[in-house]
Image (cartoon, grey):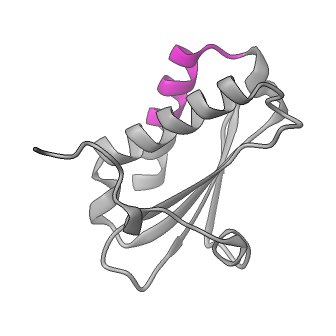
Amino acid sequence: MISSKLPRESRLCGAANYTGRFAAKIRSGHFILLSRENSASIGRIGVSLSKKHIPLAVVRNRVRRQVKELFRTSDCLARSEDLVIRATKKIMKADLVAIKLELTQLWSQRKK
């Protein structure tokens, strides 16, 4: 059976991976994308969604799942860099279709 989960090696775990110096910072309407090169052979992602910006846990988990799925299906796993996605205050007014479109645009901006 083929697993459609994001591999454990592709997830950033622990506060040390979310802090430090990031080489690039891309802002969009609802997200901030931070990226830096890593020493691993695959890309890794971390998602930071605060309760302050998204009070409902159901919505936070849905956005987190959508971000991870877009990362998994894109070519980001092949690149050796760490990505951290942070949500802004405006995210509560967005629907999931707009979030998916915006994340897709963020991935393409990062590639340039």
Q: Name the quadrant of the N terminus.
A: top left
Q: Does the magenta run of residues contain 102?
A: yes
Q: Quadrant of residue 93?
A: top right
Q: Could you tell me which residue is drawn at 25 percent across and 42 percent down? A: 4
Q: Residue at x 45, y 64 (%)?
A: 44
What is the magenta range?
94-104
Taking depth in this image into account, of 37 and 53 the one nearest to the observer is 53
Q: Give the residue at the far left of this rendering.
A: 1
Residue 70 in view here? yes
Residue 61 x %, y %:
61, 33
Identify the main secondary structure in magenta: helix
Q: Is residue 108 visible?
A: no
Farthest residue, direction bottom: 39
Q: Nearer the viewer, residue 26 or 93?
A: 93
Q: Is residue 83 left or right of residue 19?
A: left
Residue shown at 40% from the left, 63% from the top: 8
Q: Quadrant of residue 28?
A: top right
Q: Locate residue 86 relative to residue 47 in the image: left or right.
A: right
- The answer to whether 17 appears left or right of 82 in the picture is right
Question: Which residue ends up furthest to the right in the rendered image?
Answer: 52
Q: Picture quarter containing residue 53?
A: top right
Is 26 situated above or below 20?
Answer: above
User: Which residue does the image show at 32% across and 46% down from the upper left?
Assistant: 5
Q: Is residue 43 left or right of residue 95?
A: left
